[in-house]
Image (cartoon, helix red, strand yellow):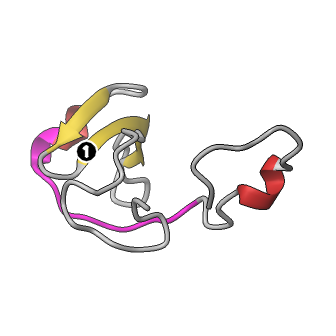
Amino acid sequence: TKAKLEEGDNFQDHLNPNTMASSEAIGDAGLKTLQHHEVIQLERRGYYRVDRPYISEEKPLILFMVPDGKTKSMGGLTGKLAHR
C-alpha cells in the first residue's frame, strides 16, 4: 500500500485484491424493519447501508459497511478487509 499516489504511479498496482468479505451475524429483531438504502450504526462496529432489506430466512438482510477513513477499526475486528 501507499499513502499517496505520485504522478506516473499506476493506481492498479496499489489496489487491495480483497475487496469483498462477508460474515453472518445475529441482530435485534428491529433490524427486520430496515428499508433499502437506510444507513444505520451498529454499536462498536461502524456505519452500514442496507443493500437488501429482510425478506425471509432464505433472503436475509444484507448490509454494506460504509468506510470511515480510520486507520484502526472500532471493534478490533481483523480480516481481509481490516483497517490498515
Is 6 located above or below residue 83 in the figure?
above
Name, please, the residue furthest toward the bottom: 79
User: Residue visible at 37% across and 44% down?
Assistant: 55
Q: Residues within 10 Å of mark 1 (few under 14, many from 20)?
A: some
Which is more toward the observer, 18 or 34?
18
Asked if residue 52 shows in the view, the reply is no
**Where are the magenta residues, as a range?**
20-30
| Image position of 26 (left or right of 13) | left
Q: Is residue 24 magenta?
A: yes
Which is more toward the observer, 36 or 78?
78
- Quarter occupied by residue 37: top left
Q: Position of residue 51 (x, y in %)?
A: 46, 38
| Image position of 44 (left or right of 23) | left
Residue type at mark 1: give it: Gly
Which part of the image, by quadrant, shows the N terminus?
bottom right
Q: Is residue 62 magenta?
A: no
Secondary structure under the numbered disc 1 in the rendered image: strand
| Image position of 30 (left or right of 40) | left
Label tally: 1
User: Residue visible at 63% across and 44% down?
Assistant: 4
| Image position of 66 (left or right of 19) | left
Is 64 located above or below residue 82 in the figure?
above
Q: Position of residue 80 (x, y in %)?
A: 49, 72
**Which residue carries the number 1 mark?**
46
Q: Position of residue 57 (x, y in %)?
A: 33, 59
Asked if residue 25 shows in the view, the reply is yes
Q: Main secondary structure of the magenta part?
A: loop
Which part of the image, by quadrant, shows the C terminus?
bottom left
User: Residue visible at 70% across and 57% down?
Assistant: 15
User: Residue visible at 40% across and 40% down?
Assistant: 69
